[in-house]
Image (cartoon, rainbow, N blue to C red):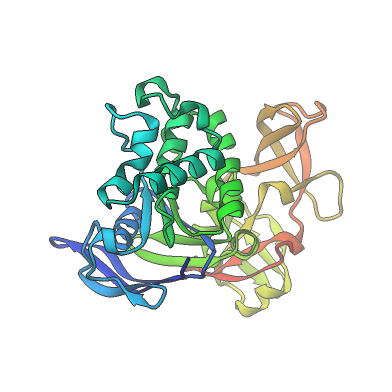
Amino acid sequence: MAGLSIRDARKSFGETEVLKGVSIDVADGEFTVIVGPSGCGKSTLLRAVAGLEDLTGGRIAIGDRDVTDLPPSERGIAMVFQSYALYPHLTVQENMAFGLRIAKMDKAEIAREVQRAAEILNIEALLGRKPAALSGGQRQRVAIGRAIVRRPQIFLFDEPLSNLDADLRVRMRYEFAALHRTLGTTTLYVTHDQVEAMTLADRIIVLRDGRIEQAGSPRELYARPANIFVAQFLGTPRMNVLRATMSGPDRATLADGRIVALPSSARALAAGASLSIGIRPEDIAIGEAPDALPFTIAFIERLGGLATVHLHGAAGGETLACQLRDDGSLREGEVVPVRLPPEHLHLFDADGVALGSGGRE
């Protein structure tokens, strides 16, 4: 195994710059997830690490080797694609063995490596089948098995679960996590799905428009987002963000004219300054309190044990989403007291950059 180092990676397609100086370090054995909206450059970056795209500028190192100009076969990587990329005329065993045969490995060694990977992935019973006879999840396991047999220094995954249905994605997330615990191989995983990022990653890198917005552990990014984009990209339902104006050292006036108490980080802003106030849906409290504000329940999404309650404030205000245990007592159209606890507020300046956050550890 080995670590991965990317320095000032730049990539342009004609006049369009897709990667704008991206620098990333992935430690040996770490599971790092690159997440971001479609078109942000994450797949282009992964393909550059794989050697499938040439960088316009910058360097890539795997372990102590500069691989920037090496072909894919010499980089010590194995890549799993969104489309599985299996040969339909070959059996599972033949698909998994294909790369080793091309590398002219001994037949007995090929058989051992295929059997080892099949046991790890619990697909021994599928070795004689062809891809057309497999489910989506089984095809994905075969694609992963084909990567495992190569014993790469680094695994690269390009949105590997996006073609699967919701239930299978959940099960495959568990299998990816278990596989990483078993093999411990350095992994770079690309997805647009923030749930995959939060559940799988040791470290998340949030990419937008070819630049890194923030990097850190899932908990760090969730509790202390660097800006509004990261705050709203991670978390379901996403963070509520309310426009406001500073009206004192520890309070702000919302767009609808109502006053909200703020945490101590607000003292960095002068009276009259514009800011945005963020709060996670699960941090909103419904119930009587001295600083509660009246909100009207516009809509309730009942999800079994949980409910997402959409709240309307005064005229000119913005809607809040609140997530809580559903005991069936709330009704649409009801006016309820709503508290925004200062210790859970995230504050952002006029440019959307975080001032600080109460968050939660």
* 264 sits to left or right of 15: right
Q: Quadrant of the C terminus?
A: bottom right
* 65 sits to left or right of 271: left
Please count the marks in the image.
0
Q: Residue at x 51, y 69 (%)?
A: 28
Please state the horizontal and vertical placement of residue 44, each as a whole percent of the image: 29, 56
* Camera-nearest residue between 48 and 150: 150
Please state the horizontal and vertical placement of residue 163, each as a whole percent of the image: 41, 33
Q: Residue at x 69, y 42 (%)?
A: 322
Q: Quadrant of residue 85?
A: top left
Q: Outermost residue toward the left?
A: 14
Please state the horizontal and vertical placement of residue 354, each as a whole percent of the image: 56, 69
Please state the horizontal and vertical placement of residue 208, each as a whole percent of the image: 39, 59
Q: Quadrant of residue 257?
A: bottom right
Q: Is residue 90 above or below residue 41?
A: above
Q: Residue at x 13, y 60 (%)?
A: 14
Q: Is residue 239 at all visible to an observer of this figure?
A: no
* Camera-nearest residue between 341 and 150: 150
